[in-house]
Amino acid sequence: MADASPPRGVADALGEVTRRQGEEEARHRAELAEVDQEVESLRTAMANLQQQLQALGKFREELVARLESVSTGASQRTYEAIFQALREQAQALSGRAAAVANVARSHQLSVDEQLEDEEIKTLLTEYQQFKEQVEPHIASFPDSYRAVLEGKHQEVQERLREALGDAGAEPPEVEAEAMNADVVVAVDAPQGVAEVVMMVLPVIEHVQTAWAEREEDLQTWLAARAMQAVYEVCHAFGLPGAQAMYGGHQGLLAVEVELGAGEPAAVRTALSETLDRVFASAPELQAAKVEVRAQPVDVDHLFPPEDEEIPEEAEAADEEVSHAG
Amino acid sequence: MLGELRPLGLSDAARSLGVDPFEVVRLMVAFEKLHERLLLKHDDVDALREAAGIEDWWRETKLPEDTNRLRAAVRGALHQLVSRRLIGEVTTRLDNLWRALALDQQVAIEQAVMMLLEEEKLLTAASPRGVQVSIAPGAEGELDAIANGETEHAELAMLWQGS
């Protein structure tokens, strides 16, 4: 029997182990290198993605800022548009007020001419005589005589008032193009109840703040009609004691009335309807060819955007004035 | 003379009453004296004066003698409240306190009223007649002492310092 192969020596066996171990190590090292390379590739990719993320994040912030500036800009543009329009209207109304005053002066001259009427002159003489010669001593006259004199004087007075009143019954009518004006009105209701009514009128603030130093005019009448409407609404909502506060904003007359009651939508509707009705039926505005409408706005649009710096002089001009008169 | 016979515009009515023209409008709405035009008969003005309780205290009465004109005004106003027994529900229009006084005195009285309201020594209430004021029950003695110049009120004193 022949042997297939001679048995390996220990040295060979160990050599074989070493060779296999070397091959295995080489294979693992190759795999490791491959994995390391893959990891490195992924790290590079991640770093790239990270950079892209950062760039996108930055770009997003810019877009958010742009979006906010559009919104703030819109608020500011709305605020500026409202007050610019009102200032232009106030200027136009001031011109129309001067025209109305001219007509009123002419009208007054014709009334004065009417005083030259013989009957009126006689009545005026009687009136004057009573005032100067009779009234100072009337207490000393017998009752029956005094009653006759007073009755006669009353009659003269009524006839004169009628004549003078009739002469001034019609408001001064101007021959001019019809012009429009807006009264801007807002209701502040942060808690779901109408807290404050705010109104800005197309008239200069001095109509109220310096009323004693200026002649009553068309601007006074427009403001008075607006206040009539506001107080009628206050009455309708059970607030007969409501009292307005006045001040100037950008040179225009601004009004605030604290309500503290009323469903906001109902108050807004009542204000718009009442203002429109009162303006439409005001004979002095009709005669001046001025058509005034209520213009409801968001309360935020009556204030400058929060980040806007208000010039000192404008701030001083916006100081609130007392309602006490 | 003709002025007595002609109706008054808002500003003239306001001058006659001692309020501003828009307060005249408020009173015309409150007491139903609005006509088609913004004109008032003299009788209407008298009726509004009566209905609103508008009084002219300082036409006949002088302010108390005082070296400080603002203190004189505040003392005078408080004296009127005390002497007229305007306490609790017996009220008067707030602007009756200062009507026809100089502007700085009007402001001083208004500020004094605000201080005394915070201290609950005065009461105010909204009313169709206008803002009403009266002495808080129990505070008459202290206000009388201030009015008479017997007591110096530290907060009020700040109003007339430097005047």
Image (cartoon, rainbow, N blue to C red):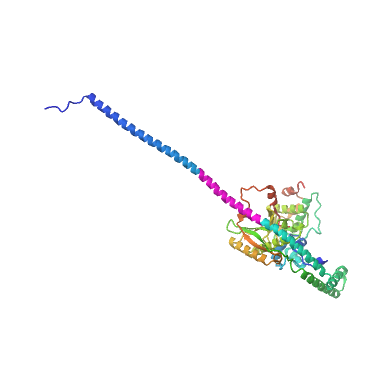
Q: Main secondary structure of the magenta part?
A: helix
Magenta stretch holds residue A126: no
Give the percent coordinates (x, y) of residue A222. Answer: 70, 62
Quadrant holding the N terminus of chain A: top left
Give the percent coordinates (x, y) of residue A234. Answer: 65, 63
Residue extending farthest to the left is A1
Give the percent coordinates (x, y) of residue B140. Answer: 73, 55
**Which quadrant of the structure image shows residue A260?**
bottom right
- Residue name at image x 35 percent, y 35 percent: A34
Q: Nearer the viewer, residue A99 or A50?
A: A99
Q: Is residue A289 left or right of residue A39?
A: right
Please determine whether, in this image, residue A256 is positioned above or below residue A119: above
Marks counted in the figure total 0
Please determine whether, in this image, residue A107 is positioned above or below residue B115: below
Q: Nearer the viewer, residue A146 or A94?
A: A94
**Which quadrant of the structure image shows residue A204?**
bottom right
Q: Is residue B69 visible?
A: yes
Magenta region, residue range: A58-85
Quadrant holding the C terminus of chain A: bottom right
Please determine whether, in this image, residue B63 is positioned above or below residue A1: below
Q: Is residue B42 left or right of residue A81?
A: right
Magenta stretch holds residue A73: yes
Q: Nearer the viewer, residue B135 or A53?
A: A53
Q: Is residue B90 visible?
A: no
